[in-house]
């Protein structure tokens, strides 16, 4: 007898249009609880659109998606966030003039006790943020700001974080910091969908991989099976690094 765990995220025939342009077509996949999915694909493939659709920022023209069996299609971004799906958009910002602590406090709407517990958890996962809680977020290093952005997302105790190019524009050392932060989020029981320019690093991190091309799934499978040849074929030399 095989026992299959119900998926955390189930996406069925998801289609998104911008006006008449179809940005995503019939996207179907499952994500098991506490797993990590790397979403790869060339520029304009529809990766950010997938993230935006799952977080309610753009409407689905067709199809559906559920989190923990709960239908989320058509819900507002705030309701989706409260259901446990948190999206870190491309070029996500922290509030630069507010302190680290203020940035984190703002990220949760719960009562004082709940908020303190969430803060304690954030500082346990990211000790650096605890050390720098009085510092203005805008004066943190790039990697630390990404860490703060992720810590903000984790304040609501999400089931799933969708990180869109969290390491974009960062020096290699700071990219290490970002991956380590995501690793910690996973260790805390959070599933991760990562959209990444560093394909091979994303594949090292992830269990599953989805390659998008012109709004469709070009390849889907276990991350360890997505070898260099596949990356060259779908992503080109430049992005396969
Ligand atoms: N608001 C919009 N209105 C019209 N077209 C859009 C809009 N947002 C995205 N698109 C188009 O949809 C397609 C998919 O865009 P998307 O941002 O999802 O790509 P991506 O895979 O994230 O690319 P990148 O790697 O460059 O970030 C592109 O052709 C893009 O031009
Ligand atoms: Mg994008």
Image (cartoon, rainbow, N blue to C red):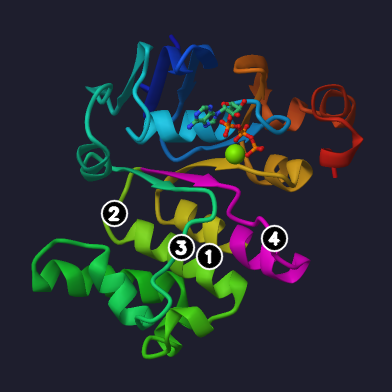
Q: Are marks 4 and 1 in contact (CB under 8 Å)?
A: no
Q: Are marks 4 and 2 in contact (CB under 8 Å)?
A: no
Residue 151 pos. (x, y %) = 40, 65
Q: Are marks 4 and 3 in contact (CB under 8 Å)?
A: no
Residue 103 pos. (x, y %) = 33, 73
Distance from Cα at disc 4 to Cα at disc 2: 27 Å
> Is tag 2's residue or tag 3's residue first in the polypeptide sequence?
3
Left or right for 170, reference 66: right
Left or right for 95, reference 232: left
Tag 4: Cα neighbours inside 10 Å, few (<14), some, or many (≥20)? few
Which mark is drawn over residue 93? Answer: 3
Residue 156: quarter of image: bottom left
> Is tag 4's residue or tag 1's residue first in the polypeptide sequence?
1
> Is tag 3's residue or tag 1's residue first in the polypeptide sequence?
3
Left or right for 80, reference 51: left
Distance from Cα at disc 4 to Cα at disc 1: 11 Å
> Is tag 4's residue or tag 2's residue first in the polypeptide sequence?
2
> SS for tag 3?
loop
Q: Are marks 1 and 2 in contact (CB under 8 Å)?
A: no
Magenta region includes residue 172: yes
> SS for tag 2?
loop
Count of number-bearing discs: 4
Residue depicted at x 22% and y 62%: 108
Which mark is drawn over residue 157? Answer: 2
Which mark is drawn over residue 186? Answer: none
Residue depicted at x 25% and y 23%: 74
In the image, the segment drawn in magenta is 160-179
Residue 148 pos. (x, y %) = 45, 69
Distance from Cα at disc 4 to Cα at disc 3: 14 Å
Distance from Cα at disc 1 to Cα at disc 2: 18 Å
> SS for tag 4?
loop
């Amino acid at each position: 007898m095989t026992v299959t765990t119900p998926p955390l995220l189930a996406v069925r025939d998801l289609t998104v249009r911008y006006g008449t342009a179809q940005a995503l077509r019939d996207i179907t996949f499952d994500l098991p609880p506490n797993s990590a999915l790397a979403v790869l694909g060339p520029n304009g493939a529809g990766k950010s659109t997938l993230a935006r659709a799952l977080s309610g920022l753009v409407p689905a023209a067709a199809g559906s998606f559920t989190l923990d069996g709960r239908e989320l299609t058509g819900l507002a971004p705030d309701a989706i966030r409260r259901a446990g799906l948190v999206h870190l958009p491309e070029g996500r910002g922290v509030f630069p003039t507010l302190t680290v602590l203020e940035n984190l406090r703002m990220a949760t709407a719960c009562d004082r006790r709940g908020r303190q517990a969430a803060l304690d958890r954030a500082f346990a996962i990211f000790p650096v943020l605890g050390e720098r809680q009085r510092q203005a977020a805008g004066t943190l290093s790039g990697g630390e700001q990404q860490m703060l952005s992720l810590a903000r997302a984790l304040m609501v105790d999400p089931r799933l974080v969708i990180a869109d190019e969290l390491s974009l524009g960062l020096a290699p050392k700071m990219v290490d910091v970002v991956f380590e932060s995501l690793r910690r989020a996973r260790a805390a029981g959070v599933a991760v969908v990562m959209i990444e320019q560093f394909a091979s690093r994303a594949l090292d991190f992830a269990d599953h991989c989805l390659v998008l091309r012109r709004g469709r799934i070009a390849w889907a499978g276990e991350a360890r099976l997505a070898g260099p040849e596949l990356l060259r074929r779908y992503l080109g030399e430049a992005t396969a690094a």
